[in-house]
């Protein structure tokens, strides 16, 4: 046999690093944090081992733990002290995220990104105020309370709330705003609001292609944001669609999104790589709660090596084209990376 081409030559230990195409660094990672205004002690989140809801007074301490691992950015989610139909606590000056952001930015160097959405703040758990569907056989959801109307999120009313929320986060010191509600026009509305109030330097990371995914299950327990009736199908994307993602992303880019996000990550790597090929923007991927929980569950059974599969997952997300990754593994993987250096 004449074997002049032998790919194995470059797989020898001392050369592997030189020819590796992708690398992972703690500075690529964003750690999500849950701040809870209803508790004064840290509450473990059962379906997300290692993660907790922390009271506002503990948010600085929590962020310091993240920074110690080498991760420099956090994404804040809030659980408010009360909810109503409009989600008014989402833009309150003394709201949970506003308070936590003020404390974290005053006392740490963390880069603070805030999730801008209404689902944790509305009593019905949808991502904006509700209205009756105009067409009776539309794609809205039947209200479980039985009055027979078909309800859906009022897109344009929600835009006004998103403007207020984003401005209130920026006023509290947020470094970056991340709208996740999948409303049409949300990036334009927020960009306009931020610029109007003098926050033109604050970038927007849009959850541009966010799918209606069952992988959000553990998060909805963690952030207490499950819809009380129906699902999010009438605003989040259909998992069957890839071309539609490009239309969504293009709209967000045109409206001024600075970073384009895909969510979830692992089941949607084709979307990440399509966006990488067509856009020059930084691409982010959200390795969501269900992706985290399933690896933990398998590891707990002794079926997978957690550290190895977490690292391989994040490396694959980068290989597909993501520049930054939001992940509940951020701290563990960052610690692993510095240990192996
Ligand atoms: C809020 C929001 C959700 C997630 C991030 N922001 C929940 C949802 O859309 O139901 C999910 C994150 C995760 O699962 O880790 N709109």
Image: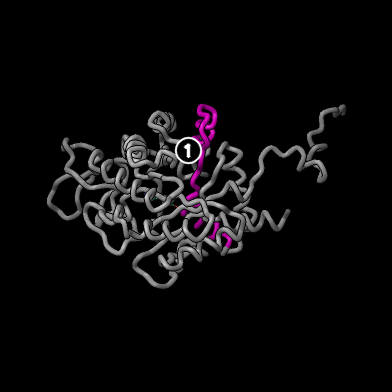
Q: Position of residue 318 (x, y in %)?
A: 59, 41
Residue placed farthest to the left in the image? 147
Number of marks in the rendered image: 1
Figure quadrant of the N terminus? top right
The dominant secondary structure in magenta is helix
| Residue at the (50%, 61%) spot, across then down | 107
Toward the viewer: 238 or 128? 128
| Residue at the (60%, 61%) spot, across then down | 68
| Residue at the (73%, 53%) spot, across then down | 341
Q: Quadrant of residue 198?
A: top left
Residue at which label 1 appears: 259
Other residues around mark 1 within 10 Å, as few (<14) / some (14–19) / many (≥20): many
**Is residue 321 found left or right of 11 in the rendered image?**
left
Toward the viewer: 156 or 322? 156
**Is residue 45 found left or right of 307 in the rendered image?**
left
Q: Is residue 281 magenta?
A: yes
Toward the viewer: 26 or 191? 191
Q: Is residue 172 above or below residue 241?
A: below
Residue placed farthest to the right in the image? 2
**Magenta region: which residues?**
271-299
Q: Is residue 180 above or below residue 46?
A: above
Q: Is residue 167 above or below residue 1?
A: below
- Residue 17 in view here: yes
Residue placed farthest to the bottom in the image? 41
Q: Position of residue 49 (x, y in %)?
A: 51, 64
Q: Is residue 178 magenta?
A: no
Toward the viewer: 308 or 186? 186
């Amino acid at each position: 046999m004449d074997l002049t081409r032998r790919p194995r030559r470059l797989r020898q230990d001392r050369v592997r690093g030189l020819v590796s195409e992708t690398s992972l660094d703690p500075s690529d990672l964003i750690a999500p944090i849950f701040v809870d205004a209803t508790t004064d002690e840290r509450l473990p989140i059962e379906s997300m081992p290692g993660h907790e809801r922390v009271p506002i007074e503990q948010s600085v301490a929590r962020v310091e733990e993240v920074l110690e691992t080498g991760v420099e950015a956090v994404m804040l989610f809030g659980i408010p002290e009360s909810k109503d139909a409009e989600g008014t606590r989402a833009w309150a000056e003394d709201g949970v995220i506003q308070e936590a952001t003020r404390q974290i930015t005053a006392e740490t160097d963390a880069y603070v990104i805030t999730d801008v959405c209404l689902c944790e703040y509305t009593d019905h758990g949808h991502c904006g105020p509700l209205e009756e569907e105009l067409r009776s056989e539309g794609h809205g959801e039947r209200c479980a309370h039985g009055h027979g109307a078909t309800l859906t999120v009022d897109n344009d009313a929600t835009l006004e709330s998103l403007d207020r929320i984003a401005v209130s986060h920026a006023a509290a010191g947020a470094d970056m705003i991340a709208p996740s509600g999948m409303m049409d026009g949300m990036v334009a509305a927020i960009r306009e609001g931020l610029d109007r109030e003098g926050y033109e330097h604050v970038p927007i990371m849009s959850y541009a292609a966010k799918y209606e995914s069952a992988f959000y299950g553990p998060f909805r327990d963690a952030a207490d944001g499950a819809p009380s009736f129906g699902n999010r199908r009438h605003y989040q994307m259909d998992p069957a669609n890839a071309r539609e993602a490009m239309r969504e992303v293009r709209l967000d880019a045109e409206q001024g999104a600075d970073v384009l996000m895909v969510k979830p990550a692992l089941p949607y790597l084709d979307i990440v790589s399509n966006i990488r090929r067509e856009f020059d923007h930084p691409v982010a991927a959200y390795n969501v709660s269900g992706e985290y929980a399933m690896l933990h569950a398998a590891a707990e059974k002794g079926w997978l090596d957690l550290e190895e599969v977490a690292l391989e997952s994040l490396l694959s997300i980068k290989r597909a084209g993501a520049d930054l990754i939001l992940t509940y593994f951020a701290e563990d993987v960052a610690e692993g990376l510095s240990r192996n250096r």
